[in-house]
Image (cartoon, rainbow, N blue to C red):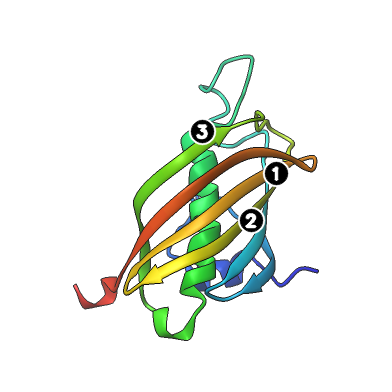
Amino acid sequence: MKVFGVDEIKNIIPHRDPFLFLDEVMELNPGKMVSARKIIKKDEFWVKGHFPNFAVCPGVIAIEMLAQAGAVCILALPQNKGKVALFAGINKARFKKQILPGDEVILNVNIVKMIGDIGIGRAQAFVDGKIAVFAEIMFALKDYSKD
């Protein structure tokens, strides 16, 4: 079931093209878990150069997709409106399957711990039902509207 698309995502996180890596949110329990989707297009900005004649999604962009999904999850809470989720750390990241143009990537993030404005999420990206990337992502919430 599609919960919401890009316009609603943009109302939650500040990312914009060409650095918005989510197409839709399929399931959301704010502050707990999210399942999102990204279709990798053949004209993504990185395709021509990573790598010529063998376009493979850079690992840092795969991690960023997961981070954006996690940000939607935590910033969808009413008390976090107007904040941004900044990377605070990446642990246990593993890349198990290449992500290629044309792939549908399913991004699942479970928030496992929140202490104040610092949180940890367990993140997994799937392609064709197989795990492509997993990591533990840490984030720090910042109220950027006050600076």
Compute the Cα span from label 3 to label 1.
14 Å
| Tag 3 near tag 1, CB within 8 Å | no
Mark 1 neighbour density, 10 Å: few (under 14) some (14–19) many (20 or more): many
Compute the Cα span from label 3 to label 2.
16 Å
Q: Which residue is rendered at x = 57% and y = 43% of the image?
A: 134
| Residue named by callout 2 | 108
Q: Which residue is rendered at x = 57% and y = 71% of the image?
A: 32
The relative height of residue 89 versus residue 121 in the rendered view (above or below) is above
Q: Secondary structure at mark 2?
A: strand
Mark 2 neighbour density, 10 Å: few (under 14) some (14–19) many (20 or more): many
- Give the image location of residue 100, x and y in percent: 67, 30
Q: Amino acid at mark 3?
A: Gly
Q: Nearer the viewer, mark 3 or mark 2?
A: 2
Mark 3 neighbour density, 10 Å: few (under 14) some (14–19) many (20 or more): some
Report the side of 36 relative to 140 (left or right).
right
The quadrant of the image that shows the C terminus is: bottom left
| Tag 1 near tag 2, CB within 8 Å | yes
- Give the image location of residue 74, x and y in percent: 48, 71
User: For residue 4, which numbered disc appears in the image?
Assistant: none
View extreme (top): residue: 53
Compute the Cα span from label 1 to label 2.
8 Å
View extreme (left): residue: 147
Pick whichever of labels 3 and 1 is earlier in the sequence.
3
| Residue named by callout 3 | 59
Q: Amino acid at mark 2?
A: Asn
Q: Secondary structure at mark 1?
A: strand
The relative height of residue 66 versus residue 58 in the rendered view (above or below) is below
Nearer to us in this view, 78 or 108: 108
Pick whichever of labels 1 and 2 is earlier in the sequence.
2
User: For residue 126, which numbered disc appears in the image?
Assistant: 1
Q: Which residue is rendered at x = 61% and y = 48% of the image?
A: 124
Nearer to us in this view, 10 or 78: 78
